[in-house]
Amino acid sequence: MKGHSEQPLIKHLFELRTTALRCIISIILITIILLPFANQIYSFIATPLIAKLPEGSSMIATEVASPFFAPFKLTLFCGIFFSIPYILYQTWSFIVPGLYINERKLILPLLISSSLLFYLGIFFAYYAVFPILFSFLTTTAPSNITIMTDINHYLDFILKLFFAFGISFEIPIATILLIKSNFITIEKLSSNRPYIILFAFFVGMLLTPPDVISQILLAIPIWILFEIGLVLGKYFTN
């Protein structure tokens, strides 16, 4: 009996290792494909800041290896970014044998919608938040200060924002799961709306850099996405 119980466990561990290796390989392959375009990718990502810099200002590299490592780091992030659909597919393939039919019908749409929402959060940050944020930050600098942002610091800054907005845009999925699992009711969530709004601003303060604009620009979408989750949650109640 012990041997029989160990074999399924070993089989699952082997399948998990295979799934993980496939995900890692996909990230590496996409990163290698994108590496020749690393500088162009960085230039594209830096456009929202460069467009708002005062005349005569530019981005700088304060470390010797920064002109190589900053674009490389961004390219690796892009490798992960573009691998997400394949990673989710591999995750789905790994967990689907242990699911009931009704669970399979629910999980697959959730995996697809969660990846789309993550992408939407990043696009929202780049196209909607960055122009407003960088316009505010560059215009509030003292007149005798020349803005010359380091490329590594800028990259760390935007990656944090990308992650914050990508995760925050999963709020509708989290809300639906809470309702579907009967962990909490729609009525209870609705009655706690003031606390949810307060929590949204707390998350905005926690996940974004210490400036009011980016905090507000994250908190408001979280609130709106929560409301969307409430509306959609009505269709998932038992």
Image (tube, rainbow, N blue to C red):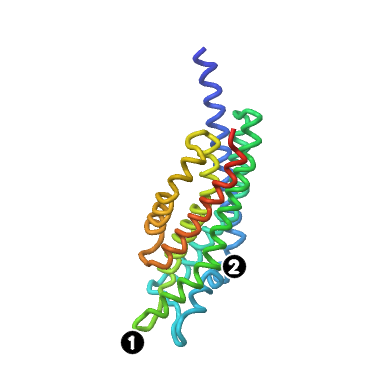
Nearer to the camera, 200 or 237: 237
Q: Residue at x 47, y 60 (%)?
A: 220
**130 w.r.t. 17: above or below:** below
Q: Which mark is residue 144?
A: 1
Question: What type is the residue that disc 2 sits on?
Answer: Phe
Mark 2 or mark 1, whichever is nearer to me:
1
Q: Secondary structure at mark 1?
A: loop
Question: What type is the residue that disc 1 sits on?
Answer: Asn
| Circle 2/circle 1 CB separation < 8 Å | no
Q: Secondary structure at mark 2?
A: helix
Callout 1: few (<14), some (14-19), or many (20+) C-alpha neighbours within 10 Å?
Answer: few
The span from disc 2 to disc 1 (Cα, nearest Å) is 36 Å
Nearer to the camera, 156 or 177: 177
> Is 213 on the left or on the right of 36, as rendered?
left
Question: Could you tell me which quadrant the C terminus lies in?
Answer: top right
Judging by the rendered image, the residue that carries numbered circle 2 is 37
